[in-house]
Amino acid sequence: MTLEKNNSRRPRRYLRSRITRKLILDTALDVFLTEGYAKTTIAKISDQAKVGYGTVYSHFKGKDDILNKVVDNVLVEFYNLLEVPFAPKTLEDARSAYYELILTSFRLAEQHRPIMKVYQQALGQSDSISGHWYGVKAHFIESSARSFTYAQEKGLAQEFDVQLGAKAYILLVDRFIWEVVNEREQDLDRIANIIIDMLFHGFFKNQPKSKKG
C-alpha cells in the first residue's frame, strides 16, 4: 500500500472514531438518566449503543470517565465564557461580566438538571468523579483569581488575597448550583444578584446598582 493511500485512510478512520465516541457519549447519557449512576454499567452502554464492550474501553477508561466527559459537554458553554478576556473599564462592565457568568452557571444547572442529579449521586460514590469536579472548580478559581488581579491592577477592586477571595466566590457559586439542581432555589436572577452584591460590596471599591433581570 502506498503512502498516499495510507494518508487518505487516516481521515476516514479518525472520522469513524469520532462518530463512535459521540455515539457512546450520547448513549451513555440516556443510560445514566434511565438507570442512575449506580446501576449504569459499561455492558449496558455498549449493548444499547450496539458497539463492542472493548470498543467502549478503547475510547474511555470506564463509566466514571464517560460521565465526566458528559458533564464536560454540559459545561462547554460556561468554559466558552471563561475564554472571553476579562477587561472591564468600569465597575458596571465588571458587574455585567460577573452577572453573566453566574447566571449562566445557574441556567446550565437548571437546563441539565437530570444529568447533574446523576452526577451528584456519583460525587458521593466515586473518588474519580469527586476529583474531576474538584479540578473543574480549581479551573474556575484560577480564572476568577486572574480576573480579581486584573480588577486590582486597574484600580477597580480593593487589595485582598485574590486566591482566597476567588476560592470563597467559586465555592459559594458551587453551593448554589446544587441548590438549583435540587430545586431548592428557582429564582436564578435573584440569587445571581445577591451573590454579585456580596462580591462587589466585599471586594470592589464602589458599589454599582444591582442589575435588574
Image (tube, rainbow, N blue to C red):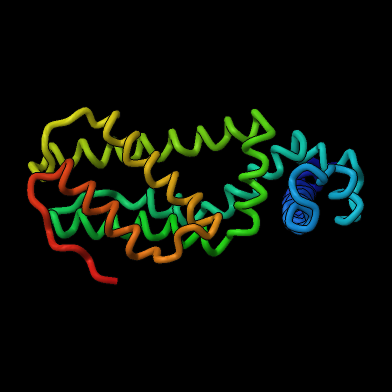
Q: Is residue 182 left or right of residue 35?
A: left
The picture places residue 44, in percent across and down from the top left corner, at 88, 49
In the displayed structure, 79 sits above or below 203; it is below
Position of the N terminus, as image quadrant, is top right
Q: Where on the picture, by quarter, is residue 55? A: top right
Q: How many badges with numbers are in the image?
A: 0
Residue 143 in view (yes/no): yes
Residue at image point 86% right, 55% down: 49
Residue 24 in view (yes/no): no
The picture places residue 88, in percent across and down from the top left corner, at 18, 53
Q: Is residue 152 left or right of residue 68?
A: left
Residue at image point 81% right, 47% down: 5
As rendered, which of 102 and 191 lies closer to the eye?
191
The picture places residue 65, in percent across and down from the top left corner, at 69, 38
As rendered, which of 8 and 118 lies closer to the eye?
118
Q: Is residue 104 left or right of residue 147?
A: right
Residue at image point 18% right, 58% down: 93
Q: Where on the picture, by quarter, is residue 187? A: bottom left
Residue at image point 57% right, 55% down: 74
Q: Where on the picture, by quarter, is residue 97? A: bottom left
Position of the C terminus, as image quadrant, is bottom left
The extreme bottom residue here reads 213
